[in-house]
Image (spheres, rainbow, N blue to C red):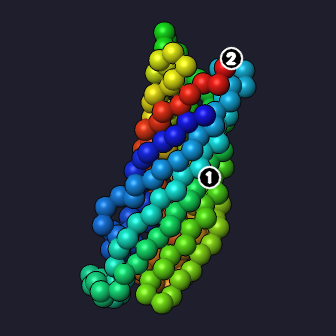
Amino acid sequence: MGLGVGVFEMTNAADSWDAVFDGPMTSFGLYLEVGLARRWLATLAADWGTADGEQVLLTDPPQPTGVDVSLDYEPIHLTLGWVAWARERWRLHLGLGPTVVRWSEAAGPRSRSATDYGGHALVGLRREVGRFSLGGDLRWSAIPDAVGDGGVSEYFGEDDIGGLGLTLLGAYRLR
């Protein structure tokens, strides 16, 4: 069981993201990992991230309007992983699985929210120190058909709110 802090960049909708938000999103998360067999594991990860930006006027290029935009982004990832390499106290694992994202966006008096589904793939590295584990995950996710009807995402022709995330983890092994 562990805690994580990370950064997420919505690379699958990079033009939309860059037009509205300034830089990557910081995220915080909880992680539960269970060993299934000698080289297999399952992980449940829940992250919470927020981003603040500014609504844009759809011109070429899009222009800021002065209307604040906030985004809450809450993905849950279920990963089936395989330990690709283990030596002494180090472990490298690969994984993939489904992702569910609950998100909400508020821009001035308007707001919208949804729950969307997709998948992810990751590579993770861990170092065990006694009952503690330190490491990180590099995760790419795809959440297709989540946006793209109206607004800046339609302007750029983007509909996938997935992307690339890097999470640093600290965990405590229960047994």
Mark 2, other Cα within 10 Å: few <14 / some 14–19 / many ≥20: few
4 relative position to 83: left or right: left
- Marks 1, 2: nearer the viewer: 1
Residue at point 44%, 83% (across, down): 107
Residue at point 65%, 25% (across, down): 174
Q: Residue furthest right?
A: 36
Residue at point 56%, 28% (across, down): 172
* Quarter of the rendering occupied by the C terminus: top right
| SS state under label 1 | strand
Q: Are marks 1 and 2 in contact (CB under 8 Å)?
A: no
Residue type at numbered disc 1: Ile
153 relative position to 60: left or right: right
Residue 30, horizontal then vertical, whole percent = 57, 44
| SS state under label 2 | loop
Q: Which residue is mark 2?
A: 38
Q: Where is 26 relative to 113, above or below? A: above
Q: Where is 108 relative to 128, above or below? A: below
Residue 36, horizontal then vertical, whole percent = 73, 25
Q: Which residue is mark 1?
A: 76
Residue type at numbered disc 2: Arg
Residue 58 in view here:
yes
